[in-house]
Amino acid sequence: MKAIQLDSLTQIDRDQWNSLAGPNYPFLRHEFLSALECRSASTETGWQPRHLLIYEQNEPVALMPLYLKFHSRGEYVFDYQWAEAYHNHHLAYYPKWLTAIPFTPCQGTRIAIKTGADQRRIVSFIASYIKETIADTGVSSWHCLFPDFPTAEQLVSEGLSLRTGIQFQWFNQGYRDFNDYLDGFSASKRKQVKRERRRIAEQSVQFLQISGKDISEQDWEAFYRFYQMTYFKRGMQPYLNIGFFLEIAETMPQNLLLIVAVKDGDYIGAALSFIGNDTLYGRYWGCNEDYHSLHFEACYYQGLDYCLANNLKRFDSGAQGEHKIARGFEPVYTYSAHWIKDRRFASAIDDFLEWETAEIQKYRLQAEKHLPFKQQT
């Protein structure tokens, strides 16, 4: 078994990469990562691609996205305190190795392995390879963000430390339609959701659901203005540029859903989601001015309508957002795995993670108490 590192996705054929990445999780696709690499996640922006390709008997059997990172922006698993601790001890936390999908806090495949290959052996080989590489360089650590749980477990068995987080996701329990879904709510919570959807209609706001192949360039330009506003309102610059969106519109339209809010014939807001095999991933949103319940309708209820109409099993609406709980999005664990070269810092971080995990578990139990569903008797 041997490892080859790629400085760019242009060094591997798209079909060869995708044959390992598979069709189910859109963010690991060559099209998505290549668009990021060309437009936003590049050496110039502190994301130096060093993707890992594993060969056995001269055949590719696994791949792993990998970046040499010179900052911690765009990751959504926050290690700024760790970096500060290094700085306070006159040590360098950056650069670090990062296995992640840039700017995408969506749990999924991080090590894609050929069907039939020995998964445990390959993950063990990758972990050993990364540790040896770190030992021979000035890299401080390796971080794998938002892997699926089986991968996280395997990485822990290879000596990495597990970190737990919380997101809120919706699960389809075989609902016939939105009203059937609301029937499972308590009366007060059901009334709240119906009132929010009614307020949208009372403001004469309507919605269009536009599939990727039907999204025009004018639609993309309008969406991008809204997307920018989300960042500008916080005094920030957006991570992604219009070129990124126009590129994925060309290369992976089958994975895109644009939801547009319209009032008096004008677009007033939009939300962009990605479509996986059985999951809708809500990703980007923005509006030019606030309307009552516009965010809830564009980012949640329209997405739920789409999931129900297309028999999708899950709606992953992204990071944060306790307001999702009252709308039936359940708290679920997310994971990251970390290997720190300096064993003194590794021990201190392990102590912190033990405390943090206990707090996360308490938080999940508290959040579950606020779900809107009727109490089972």
Image: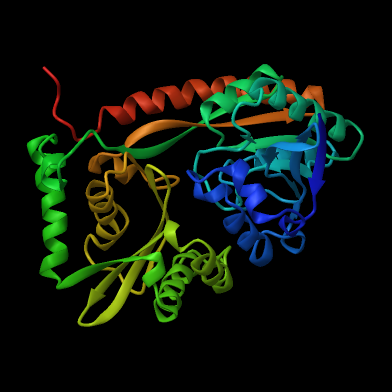
Question: Quick check: 332 left or right of 309?
Answer: right
Residue for point 65% across, 26% down: 117
Observer able to see residue 339: yes
On screen, residue 274 above or below 19: below
Residue for point 69% across, 26% down: 123
- The quadrant in which residue 94 appears is top right
Question: Quick check: 168 left or right of 291?
Answer: right
299, 175: nearer the viewer: 175
Q: Quadrant of the C terminus?
A: top left
Question: Quick check: 136 left or right of 37?
Answer: right
Residue for point 49% across, 65% down: 231
On screen, residue 159 above or below 264: above
Q: Position of residue 193 (x, y in %)?
A: 16, 49
- The quadrant in which residue 132 appears is top right
122, 151: nearer the viewer: 122
Observer able to see residue 94: no
Q: Quadrant of the N terminus?
A: top right
274, 229: nearer the viewer: 274
Residue for point 50% across, 39% down: 107
Q: Position of residue 99 (x, y in %)?
A: 67, 41
On screen, residue 294 above or below 105: below
Q: Position of residue 255 (x, y in %)?
A: 44, 56
Q: Position of residue 348 (x, y in %)?
A: 71, 23
Visual colour scheme: rainbow
Give the mark count.
Answer: 0
